[in-house]
Amino acid sequence: GAGVSQSPSNKVTEKGKDVELRCDPISGHTALYWYRQSLGQGLEFLIYFQGNSAPDKSGLPSDRFSAERTGGSVSTLTIQRTQQEDSAVYLCASSLVQSSYNEQFFGPGTRLTVL
Amino acid sequence: GDSVTQMEGPVTLSEEAFLTINCTYTATGYPSLFWYVQYPGEGLQLLLKATKADDKGSNKGFEATYRKETTSFHLEKGSVQVSDSAVYFCALSVFGNQFYFGTGTSLTVIP
């Protein structure tokens, strides 16, 4: 079946512009996660959605970052007024339910470059 | 807070060599532990996991044992192959709402 998909695969933008990154999770997966992977760094948790519950935004690095999940499926991560330090690979993952032992399925990522 | 520390790379081994990638963790509760692998040009995928102390996760010849007494989850393989060249990430989760990943260890296996 289809895995997690993300778009665009690459995004180059100018400092100060807003960007939107999209994630399509696996159908039926209720949990959705966003991570940021910077060069030489591990995966940094950004935000988590579980069903219709309020998202866990504790990982968002600043108020320029926001995310929404419409209809419990597709999610959009928005970065406003992008800065050069926002350059990274943004990964989305989904899992069947919220559980500490459920496998996460990752998308291929969106590589964001802020000039 | 919860965190994972894993061995820094890069690691270069000859084919059929023994592999160990160290991973230690700090957690406030009772975490589940994971190893994810990222092959060149591909997304992260689960390699193995263990959900309680003394559990051993295994897959594709790789093994890792959940050691509560040493707070470790070291990844091992007895005989690596060129196809094992990838970046390996150790991770933990306590409640499933947040997963904490290590910085990744790059492995290159040469023929």
Image (spheres, coloured by chain):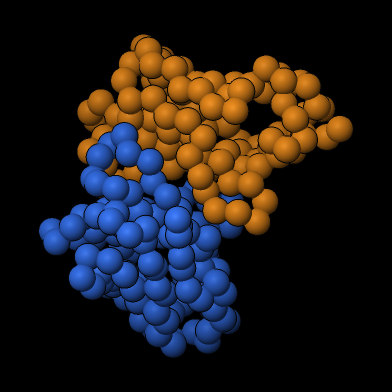
Chain colours: A blue, B orange
Q: Residue furthest left?
A: A53
Judge whether A9 appears above or below B43 on screen. Answer: below
Residue A58 in the figure: left or right of residue A43:
left
- Identify the residue at horizontal 33%, vertical 49% (top origin): A95
Could one spot residue B21 in this view of the protein?
no
Task: Give the percent coordinates (x, y) of residue B98.
Answer: 29, 46
Could one spot residue A22 in this view of the protein?
yes
How many badges with numbers are in the image? 0
- Point out the image quarter for the N terminus of chain A: bottom left
Judge whether B42 appears above or below A89 on screen. Answer: above
Res A51 quadrant in image: bottom left
- Identify the residue at horizontal 46%, vertical 65% (top origin): A5
- Identify the residue at horizontal 23%, vertical 73% (top origin): A70
Task: Give the percent coordinates (x, y) of residue B58.
Answer: 51, 23
Res B83 quadrant in image: top right
Task: Give the percent coordinates (x, y) of residue B91.
Answer: 42, 37
From the viewer's side, name the closer residue of B40 and A62: B40
Task: Give the percent coordinates (x, y) of residue A88.
Answer: 52, 65
- Identify the residue at horizontal 31%, vertical 69% (top origin): A75
- Point out the image quarter for the C terminus of chain A: bottom right
From the viewer's side, name the closer residue of A3 and B16: A3
From the viewer's side, name the closer residue of A31 and A19: A31
